Amino acid sequence: MTGKLLGAALIGAAAVWGFAARQRQLRQRRELVSSLQQALGHMASAIRCQRQPMTPLLTELARRQKCGGYFAAVLREVESRIPLQTAWKQAFAELPDGETAEILLAVELTGDETHLLAGLEYAQLRLRQLGEQREQGDRRDRRLTGAALFACFYGSVHGAIIVKPSGDPQAVVTEFFDDMTAGNYTAAYEHMEGYSTLGLENTPDSETAVLAYDALKASYSYKLYGDCTVDGLTAKQQVVFQYLDLSSIGDDVQSKTEENLNSIVQSRSRSEVYDENNNYLPAVTDEAYSAAVQAVLERAQNYYTTTAFEVELEYTNGDWYIIPNSAMLSALTGGTVN
């Protein structure tokens, strides 16, 4: 028994060391995402409210602790007369995290102020969602790792632990998507492991975001495809899901916004449209953008898309729980999370 205890202790110590190293890595990744999200929010605010030029804005952002090095790299390239968009892509292509890099590389820094702000705010939203999902996922990993360490120690001393699952995983999938399509988000979230929320129950800050989220929720429909396959403590179920692809409406919203701005310019006096620096007044761009979103969403069904993905489940604590994957999260959030 002493030998078993010693062996279990050594195994446990090695596992704990590896777990701690992994947690440090995950924490640093979350902190970088949070820092970038805050930086993009500051950029949008400085451009909208202060009309701050890009070079001094980049200089300010380059002093940030977690993400300043990337903005410093952009600034160096811009000062070397490299175009801003090119400098941005070169700097953020160096991000060690592929998902975060994808979000930053999609930001377009060309076009007018409305287009620029829309891109920054969209990227900020995606970073916030990514950070929330990773925080939930990391908590789940910590919980499962703790259970695995216990099983490792117990099994080393007493022998294997055998768990036989009960319940119907397919019924859990059905209940989850029934609740999601009916707007019963709190009930739906109870079937998820690692995520306490997807944020769909929250009311967005802006009127246009409310319109988009309402249209997204109204677009949901689903059906199960094939049988649910069970393998030990895991299960899989194919789902066909319809949703409003929010990522596909951007070009049409931008085009309609420009059309609305042209109409406003033709119908109002110059002082009602431009400020002293010949830029659109914020109220004018907000009006044009809001009207564009409403017009596009009146034809929301034109942007519906159908996708198929695999729902993964895990048996834990005496019940089956859905483990959200990227395909499922992307569909539920209208394609805004990849």
Image (cartoon, rainbow, N blue to C red):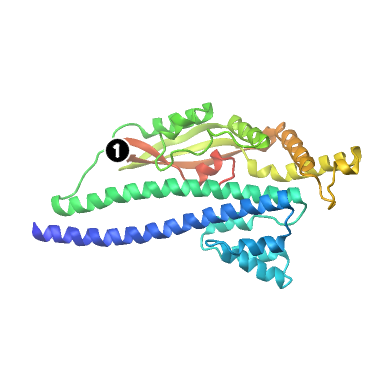
Residue drawn at (29%, 38%) of the image: 317
Q: Residues within 10 Å of mark 1 (few under 14, many from 20)?
A: few
Residue in the image at 86% along x and 39% along y: 264
Q: How many marks?
A: 1
Question: Could you tell me which secondary element the residue under label 1 belongs to?
Answer: loop
Report the quarter where the N terminus lies.
bottom left
Residue 213 pos. (x, y %): 61, 35
Classify residue 217 as left or right of residue 278: left
Residue at far left of view: 1
**293 and 117: which one is in front?**
117
The quadrant where residue 268 appears? top right
Q: Is residue 279 visible?
A: yes
**Residue 83 picture location, percent across and down:** 73, 66
Task: Decide which of 209, 306 is in the foreground and name it.
Answer: 209
Where is 61 relative to 312, above or below? below
Which residue is denoted by mark 1 in the rendering?
317
Q: Is residue 216 left or right of residue 152?
A: right
Amino acid type at mark 1: Asn
Residue at x 51%, y 45% (from the top left corner):
327
Q: Nearer the viewer, residue 273 or 119?
A: 273
The residue at the point 77 percent across, 40 percent down is 283
Would residue 338 be seen by someone viewing this image from the given angle? no
Q: In the image, residue 154 lies at what x, y percent?
A: 18, 50
Q: Position of residue 273 (x, y in %)?
A: 85, 43
Tell me where residue 261 sits by quadrant.
top right
Which quadrant of the figure has residue 334? top right
